[in-house]
Image (cartoon, rainbow, N blue to C red):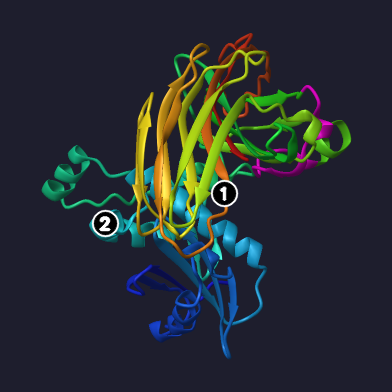
Amino acid sequence: MLNSLFIVNTSCDVILEKHWKSVIHRTVCDYFFDVQKKVAQPEDVPPVLSTPHHYLISVYQNQLYLIAVTTVETPPLMVIEFLHRVIQTFVQYFDEFSDSCIKENIVLVFELLDEMLDNGFPLATELNILQELIKPPNFLRTIANQVTGKTNVSEVLPTGQLSNIPWRRADVKYTNNETYFDVIEEIDAIIDKQGATVFSEIQGYIDCCCKLSGMPDLTMTLVNPRLLDDVSFHPCVRFKRWENERVLSFVPPDGNFRLLSYHIALQNMVAIPVYVRHTIHMKAGSGGRIELTVGPKQNMGKVLEDVVVEMNMPKAVQNCNLLPSHGKYSFDPSTKLLQWNVGKIELGKPPTLKGTMSITASGPVDSPPIIVKFKINQLAASGLKVNRLDMYGEKYKPFKGVKYITKSGKFQVRT
């Protein structure tokens, strides 16, 4: 499957290279660098590139590219999914995925890659299994390893890898059995000047934090599962039961994991909880004036948090002199990005942004689109069915209910 893996930055520097079968020289990345220099944005590089002797499959995250090199045709989505799993593993181990954290933990990075791939094929990609194989770094463990001469690599193979449920550790014990579900939804919508929704869609995720003893079997039902499109499941979900009954039945991994992701494209189901009123006048050579008002809709009754308003100004705009009633604003003359960090908005007096702009005599001065980003935190309670499976002799009392938390809703509205 994978012959080599390269981690490079946007400056065309190779941060790390790892080979599993035969060594492929890093000059193969020159094909990737040639394409990278031609695109306007780093994320615009095509995910799959074909060279005379290799295929380059890449993902972009936090100013870094992960480039997988194969010599034969390989399902690209499988490789892309594995590269994203590598990024998630690094984030769980090092709290971030960046150039500096890779260099500071280079030995641990190679150990993780050795366990995640065997001869180029995925082997151990579940986080709880990897944490048994390779202990996460911390200060006390580092000092103990220096004194005793030991490493973070375990000498015993995890029992979960030998079972028919490789994503869950065996002999798990907790004093308080509990599990949490975070439903995160991102709404992307386009709204016209009259406030009508032109286009809208939802991308949702259900992230779980499971702390249950033994080998529990969970069953979750959704209110209206027919609305979900392009559903992607964790391997623990029994897909046949979902196809037949639209019920989520699974033996969960231990710890944090993403249960499923989904997409909803029904415009009538998307309620936009924010409104934007704007007055923008621009004239070449004489300047312009802008007035923005953003706030929550009265009928929604939601509190908006982390509100950010962005506008990509035309090239003719040289500077902005604005006065916000809430928060702070910034204008970058090089990228022409106007950003207004409003913060938290409650029902009442909505925040406004007023001021003037300096415009040159040449260049187009069309009114730019307005991008609004915000979050909504909600809390609800629901039930979950838990069955006892004493496969390993574990005995615990199944709890009656489970906290069901909508932790963070992320929305984006374009007008």
Taking the magenta stretch, the answer to whether it contains residue 234 is yes
List the single residue furthest toward the bottom.
Answer: 52
The answer to which image quadrant residue 200 occupies is: top right
From the viewer's side, name the closer residue of 20 and 319.
Answer: 319
In space, the residues marked 2 and 1 are separated at their CA atoms by 40 Å
List the single residue furthest toward the right.
Answer: 244
Estimate the x, y position of residue 404 in percent, counting from the top left.
60, 18
- The residue positioned 35% from the left and 55% from the top of the image is 333
Q: Is residue 124 visible?
A: no
Taking the magenta stretch, the answer to whether it contains residue 1 is no
Residue type beneath disc 1: Ser
Which of the two discs, 2 and 1, labels the residue nearer the N terminus?
2
Residue at mark 1:
367
How many marks can you see? 2
Residue type beneath disc 2: Ser
- The residue positioned 39% from the left and 82% from the top of the image is 26
In the rendered structure, the answer to whether residue 185 lies left or right of residue 223 reads left
Categorize mark 1 by other alpha carbons within 10 Å: few (<14), some (14-19), many (20+).
Answer: some
Estimate the x, y position of residue 381 in percent, counting from the top left.
62, 12
Estimate the x, y position of residue 212 in percent, counting from the top left.
53, 23
Q: Label 2's element? A: helix
Residue at mark 2:
100
In the rendered structure, the answer to whether residue 326 lies left or right of residue 216 reads left
Q: Is residue 299 above or below residue 250?
A: above
Q: Which residues are magenta?
A: 223-239
Categorize mark 2 by other alpha carbons within 10 Å: few (<14), some (14-19), many (20+).
Answer: few
Q: Label 1's element? A: loop
List the single residue furthest toward the top.
Answer: 400
